[in-house]
Amino acid sequence: MATFNGATWLDHELSDPHVSGARDQGFGRELRGALAVQRQWPVEQGFAHEDAHAFRLRRGVLTKVQRRDLLRLAAQVSGDLVRLMFKLHPLRG
């Protein structure tokens, strides 16, 4: 999930300034690693700023990314439905 190009629960964790401190062993270590990887994408896209002291997502970024994902999915479903329609009812002419 850390390399998924879209909003995930990791992004919600990054956006919460009160994230609980995960233990540095087992799943907690994996979570910290995944969060570190996930921080790279919004910084590269200009959606966040990170310095030595803090990581900050720009306001509304998660909503924007979720909307983009929803529009991408809607276009995919729409295309699938059109292909299915033409498969079931080919054009004659």
Image (spheres, rainbow, N blue to C red):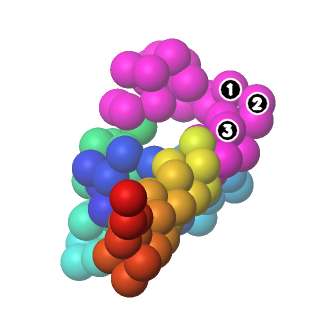
Q: Residue at x 44, y 21 (%)?
A: 45
The residue at the point 29 percent across, 43 percent down is 37
Circle 1 or circle 3, nearest the eye = 3
The one nearer the camera, 40 or 90, is 90
Position above or below: 63 against 29: above
Left or right of 40, for residue 56: right
| Horizontal relation, residue 92 to residue 50: left or right | left
Mark 1–mark 3 distance (CA, rounded to whole Å)? 10 Å
Q: Nearer the viewer, residue 54 or 45?
A: 45
Q: Which mark is residue 59?
A: 2
Asked if the residue at tag 1 contacts the one at tag 2, i.e. Cβ–Cβ closer than 8 Å, the answer is: yes
Asked if the stretch drawn in magenta spans residue 48, the answer is yes
Q: Secondary structure at mark 3?
A: helix
Residue 14 percent coordinates (x, y): 55, 48
Indicate the quadrant containing the N terminus: top left, top right, bottom left or bottom right.
Answer: bottom left
Q: Which is nearer the eye, 26 or 41? A: 41
Residue under numbered circle 1: 58
| Distance CA(mark 3)–CA(mark 2) | 10 Å
* Residue type indicated by callout 3: Lys
Pinpoint residue 9: horizontal percent, then vertical percent.
52, 64
Q: Residue furthest right?
A: 59
